[in-house]
Image (cartoon, grey):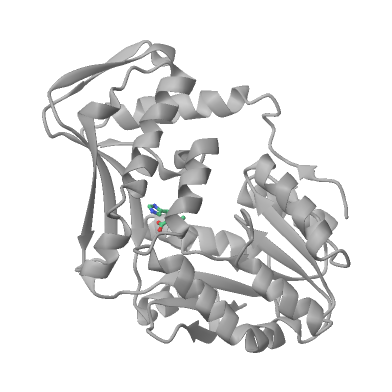
Amino acid sequence: TAPLINLSQKLDGTEDTAAFARHVAEGLSQTQKTLLSRYFYDGQGSRLFQQIMELPEYYLTRCEFEVLQTHKQAIAAHFSDPGFFHLVDLGAGDALKTKILLQELTQSQKGFDYVPVDISGDAMQQLRGTLQKEMPLLEVQAVVGEYFSALDWMHQHKPDRKVVLFLGSNIGNFKEAESQNFLRSVRRYLKAGDKLLLGVDLRKDPETVLKAYSDASGVTAAFNLNLLTRINRELGGNFNLEQFRHYALYNPQDGVMRSFLVSKIEQEVHIGALQQSYHFDAWETIHTENSHKYTLPQVEALASASGFKVEKVFQDKQCRFADVLLTV
Ligand code: AVJ
């Protein structure tokens, strides 16, 4: 197993904080205050997200598990014609779902190596360790960095066929236009015969969607509020978490789950690193996340607008979630 490749410039974390500060300053200065969902995943946020994935209400992870478990043989067969490939896992995290495919691919003796990519160095270090133990024969090249730095690096160092995984409905966090841009950019790194397996959450009973993002035990609320804790810690903010609440709203018309933090009172919040105070009216909102739910025709349109063809759609029994195999 190869040592980690670290493509993130900020080895000491300083540049990271500067970008965070810039984004927070921008987001809180807008009329509709916003914070970017990518900042959920500090140490505590990543732990809370793992708890979310185990919630009874959060059907997404279980459904995708079922999809991969049920269709792993078919999926593996699609991957491996016609020979050796690099399996690139964008946002691999703990790779719990990918392991289903890894096992299937190694058992059926397909020629491939595994390239997990994640912005979290801790996650990649850990994954490298567990895979070494669990699947010692698997060739692993873990990469720490943003999606496109990793794809650039792959382009230069791993020239063979590529199968890219973008699982877990991570695409759902992008705005409409952004998701197309993202897929187009991924497309540019691929050659004829290469593939992308895209995990998308499907339209369903709005009640089911809403509950997945406002669970009874309050884990999702803690996950959302943790953004404020992170600002307090990393940017010297004085957010009082008691004075904000989590609110999730699903619109079945556009299929967008929107998450907010709502100020319970009129208040001023100071952020030291920004040398700035922010005013909140009573019940003013901070928009923190979008989670898109798709129809299959929408996925097809998105794919073809980004230069992909739909090769096969894999779904769970209840048709709640789809892993869509795209080819260039
Ligand atoms: C990791 C982006 C797929 O949008 O469902 C879970 C994040 N936010 N609960 C999602 C999330 C609130 C999750 N994704």
Residue drawn at (68%, 75%), measured in percent from left and top? 101
In the rendered image, which quarter contains the C terminus? bottom right
Please provide percent x and percent y for residue 58.
38, 63
- The residue located at (64%, 89%) in the rendering is 74
Q: How many marks?
A: 0
**Residue 270, position in %: x, y?**
31, 14
79 in relation to 293, above or below? below
Q: Is residue 44 above or below residue 148?
A: above
Which quadrant would residue 281 be assigned to in this image?
A: top left
Quadrant containing ligand 1: bottom left
Quarter occupied by residue 56: bottom left
Residue 303 position within the rendered picture, expressed as x and y whole percent measured from the top left: 48, 74
Residue 265 appears in which quarter of the rendering? top left
Is 281 displayed left or right of 261 in the figure? left
Nearer to me, 112 or 42: 42
Q: Which residue ends up furthest to the front in the rendered image?
A: 217
Q: Position of residue 63 (x, y in %)?
A: 45, 74
Q: Residue at x 15, y 31 (%)?
A: 264
Where 181 sits versus 84, above or below? above
Query: Can you say which quadrant of the picture contains the N terminus?
Result: bottom right
- Please indicate whether residue 200 sits to the left or right of residue 209 in the image: right
Residue 256 visible at all = no
- Residue at figure coordinates x 27%, y 54% from the top left: 216
